């Protein structure tokens, strides 16, 4: 195959994926712009506070169902693959039921005890959106595991079209507030679920499906579920501290700045949807060394692109803030620059994490995030009280750098351990 033919084949293979990630990131970006302009930074801060609960539910779903499915699903073939996906579908339904029950029993009292200040309509909208979003994530992840990338694109097109249409109608009608915005996002996610519903054969699982799938996933998910909890606190500790100390407008500025970095999120989302599946496939049919070489190429190419984009966004932070939000708020400009730096570390963390997950080594990932969470919980409030929004951003970046350092050390120790075992395995009997 010539270089041109190979390039064309790669474009055809990955073009749909990149289009899908661009759609997802673009939808998130447009949604944030609409909400910031309609609600202001204070109202958008309230929306962002509610969104944190949705992200927590998504993280648990990803840890218990989605991530193990992305690693284990490609390793199954034929009838075993069909049986596995039928079991996982039942596991997802059980997860949604458990999430609803847990949210009603614990989530609402916890929100009130923490002084979140969310109204009853807002709390109801959070619960609805959390379930819809988790279901949407599942059908989308399943499509990628099955290499049905066109289906994944249709799922996200359906969700984006409905979501943006509803937000526009609410905005023009003067009825856009945090609760209605959350509801619009939930209806959009349900549209994606409808577009990606599995065929009827997948619903016919043998008795004991939930137990089988849970046991199959347990080896990875026992660490990943704990990791999801830690990552939520790690990712949001400084943002919550900023909201508590500086007010909802500071939290809104942080989220507005993060959204401008959506151009880089295209790469991160593509990485999480495609690279784990491809690495697992290579490891199962060739060797882990081949999968590791593949991940090194991803790190070099993706890292260079991420760095270039981060530098560009950081330099253009002020005009980007004016273009997106209609005003050059100093806090928003600062947040854009902080997240531009953060995304370089976030990309490298994702690659090293995928490498460890491909080996089904999730404990080091948990340890790294535990250390990052400990740092965030200890330093968040005092850092924000001392340095304000700049302290929150510096803490977020330093926490991610700490996680990367620990993960890189774990990956190096694992590689050295394999190198030490290999000569003995090939020695004299």
Image (cartoon, rainbow, N blue to C red):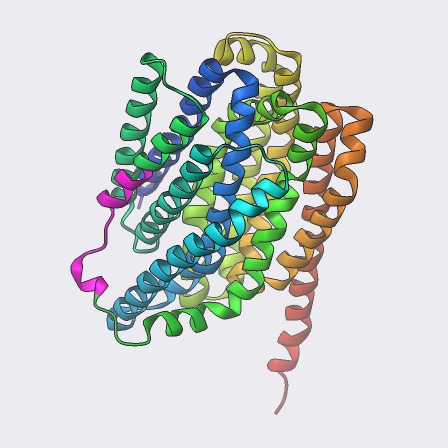
Question: In terms of secondary structure, what is the magenta stretch mainly?
Answer: helix
Res 420 → quadrant? bottom right
Q: Quadrant of the C terminus?
A: bottom right
Residue at image x 62%, y 75%?
422
Chain part drawn in magenta: 189-203
Residue at image x 44%, y 54%?
99
Foreground residue, 223 or 272? 223
Residue 318 in the image, given as x and y percentages of width and height:
60, 11
Q: How many marks?
A: 0
Residue 59 in the image, given as x and y percentages of width and height:
50, 49
Query: Compared to 150, does 19 lie above or below?
Result: above
Q: Is residue 4 visible?
A: no
Query: Compared to 36, does 408 lie above or below?
Result: below
Foreground residue, 354 or 45? 45
In this picture, residue 191 sits left or right of residue 222: left
Q: Is residue 202 magenta?
A: yes
Q: Is residue 293 visible?
A: yes
Residue at image x 53%, y 53%?
354
Q: Is residue 88 magenta?
A: no
In this picture, residue 111 sits left or right of residue 412: left
In this picture, residue 370 sits left or right of residue 308: right
Residue at image x 79%, y 28%?
385
Foreground residue, 350 or 176? 176
Residue 425 in the image, given as x and y percentages of width and height:
61, 81
Q: Tell which residue pokes out farthest to the left in this image.
A: 200
Residue 178 in the image, given as x and y percentages of width and height:
45, 26
Res 320 → quadrant? top right
Query: Compared to 216, does 147 lie above or below?
Result: above
């Amino acid at each position: 195959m010539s270089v041109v033919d190979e390039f064309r084949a790669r474009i055809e293979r990955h073009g749909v994926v990149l289009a899908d990630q661009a759609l997802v990131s673009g939808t998130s970006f447009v949604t944030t712009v609409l909400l910031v302009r309609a609600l202001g930074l204070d109202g958008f801060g309230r929306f962002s506070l509610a969104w944190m609960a949705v992200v927590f539910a998504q993280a648990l779903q990803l840890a218990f169902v989605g991530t193990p499915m992305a690693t284990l699903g490609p390793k199954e073939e034929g009838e075993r693959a069909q049986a596995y996906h039928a079991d996982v579908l039942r596991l997802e339904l059980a997860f949604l039921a458990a999430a609803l029950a847990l949210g009603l029993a614990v989530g609402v009292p916890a929100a009130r005890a923490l002084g979140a200040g969310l109204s009853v309509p807002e709390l109801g909208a959070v619960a609805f959106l959390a379930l819809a979003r988790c279901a949407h994530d599942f059908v989308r992840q399943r499509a990628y595991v099955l290499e049905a990338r066109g289906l994944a694109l249709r799922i996200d097109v359906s969700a984006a079209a409905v979501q943006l249409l509803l937000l526009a109608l609410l905005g023009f009608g003067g009825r856009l507030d945090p609760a209605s915005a959350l509801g619009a996002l939930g209806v959009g996610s349900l549209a994606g679920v409808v577009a990606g519903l599995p065929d009827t054969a997948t619903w016919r699982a043998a008795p004991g499906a939930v137990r089988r799938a849970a046991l199959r996933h347990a080896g990875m998910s026992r660490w990943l579920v704990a990791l999801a909890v830690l990552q939520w606190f790690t990712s949001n500790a400084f943002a919550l501290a900023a909201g508590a100390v500086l007010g909802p407008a500071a939290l809104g500025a942080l989220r507005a700045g993060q959204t401008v970095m959506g151009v880089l999120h295209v790469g991160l989302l593509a990485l999480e949807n495609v690279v784990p599946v491809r690495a697992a496939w290579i490891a199962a049919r060739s060797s882990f060394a081949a999968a590791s070489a593949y991940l090194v190429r991803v790190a070099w190419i993706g890292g260079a692109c991420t760095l270039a984009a981060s530098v560009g966004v950081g330099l253009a932070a002020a005009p980007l803030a004016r273009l997106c939000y209609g005003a050059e708020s100093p806090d928003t400009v600062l947040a854009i620059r902080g997240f531009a730096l953060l995304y370089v570390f976030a990309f490298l963390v994702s690659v090293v994490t995928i490498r460890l997950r491909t080996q089904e080594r999730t404990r080091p990932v948990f340890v790294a995030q535990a250390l990052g969470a400990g740092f965030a919980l200890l330093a968040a409030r005092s850092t924000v009280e001392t340095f304000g929004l700049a302290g929150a951003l510096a803490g977020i970046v330093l926490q991610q750098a700490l996680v990367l350092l620990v993960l890189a050390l774990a990956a190096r120790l694992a590689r050295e351990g394999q190198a030490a075992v290999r000569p003995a395995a090939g020695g004299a009997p």
